[in-house]
Amino acid sequence: MAGRIEKSALHVPALEELCEVLQDGLKRNFADVHVSVVDCPDFTQEPFCFAAAGLCGEPRIADVGGVPYLLPLPQTDKIYNLNTVAEEVELPGAFILGAGAASFKAVGVNAEVVEVRSSRRTGQSNFVSCMREALERHYGDKPVGMGGTFLIQKGKAKIHVMPEFSPCPLNSDEAVSNWLKFFDMSAPLICQSVYVSRDPGFDLRVEHTHCFSHHGEGGHYHYDTTPDTVEYLGYFSPAEHLYRIDRPDKIHKLGWEQ
Ligand code: ZN
């Protein structure tokens, strides 16, 4: 069973306004940017092949557990049932997408989404950080949460996968880096992502993205390694509520940058 559940309303800007904020923010970091409001594509089709057709409905973000349950030594009793999480965010049977293991998020079904196209990275931020930082700059202490999916259509990305649990305690970021396995993976990669512009005080992981592919590659997204040729196409929707489930009592920042 999960521990306590904390709930908080998020600021939900109009989609047109979000487009402007993201367009401006991404322009700082990518040569070509186009952000618009579109009807959500059918995500049950290739290349996505998700279990539900669209985003939205009553979108909510759930941040469950946390890295302190994994490091320095794993607490292997921390297993969460997605059906239970759907009930805990008051959407039983919800379609859930996002980054599993340390955190993931929940979204409903159907409607419009913000479509984001960006290519040729000119700045240092990755695609997700760049959008999150744009929202934080614009909305300040009003937290805005976004969830959705994006494709890395061209280029390569640095991705990590977790090997078997380490038998010895991982007490430093360096030890965590040495334990994780890093790879350069090739497009097309299908990513599921969640980000919150600013942590409203829940020890959140403010951005988290996992990806998979149809050629056997996948893992935790860090950034693309081919800035000159990379192309991103994403669909995101603002979430209305944030649920923090089973927040660890003891907080450390070990491994959060991984
Ligand atoms: Zn991850």
Image (cartoon, rainbow, N blue to C red):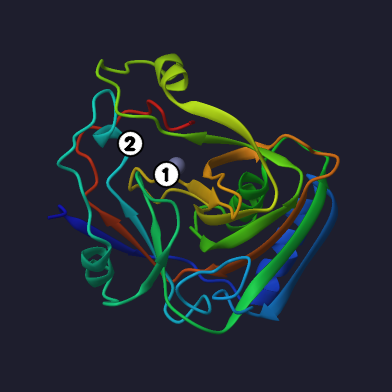
Residue 41 falls in image quadrant: bottom right
Under tag 1, what secondary structure? loop
The amino acid beneath tag 2 is Val
200 to 70, vertically: above or below: below
Q: Which residue is mark 1?
A: 205
Residue found at the very far left of the displayed protein: 1
Taking the spot 45% from the left edge, 17% from the top edge, the residue there is 178
Taking the spot 58% from the left edge, 58% from the top edge, the residue there is 139
Residue in front for this viewpoint, 256 or 75: 75
Coordinates of residue 109 in the picture (x, y in percent): 46, 80
Give the numbered dot on residue 181: none
71 to 48, vertically: above or below: above
Picture mark count = 2
Coordinates of residue 148 in the picture (x, y in percent): 54, 64
Residue 66 falls in image quadrant: top left
Coordinates of residue 243 in the picture (x, y in percent): 31, 61
Coordinates of residue 64 in the picture (x, y in percent): 30, 52
Q: CA distance from mark 2 to mark 1?
A: 9 Å
235 to 257, vertically: above or below: below
Under tag 2, what secondary structure? helix
- Tag 2 and tag 1, C-beta contact below 8 Å: yes
Left or right of 156 in this view: 167: left
Taking the spot 56% from the left edge, 84% from the top edge, the residue there is 111
Q: Ligand 1 sits in which quadrant? A: top left
Left or right of 78 in this view: 181: right
How many neighbours does mark 2 have within 10 angstroms: few (below 14), some (14-19), or many (20 or more)?
A: many
Give the numbered dot on residue 67: 2
Left or right of 225 in this view: 50: left
The amino acid beneath tag 1 is Arg
Taking the spot 37% from the left edge, 25% from the top edge, the residue there is 254
Residue 186 falls in image quadrant: top right
210 to 105, vertically: above or below: above
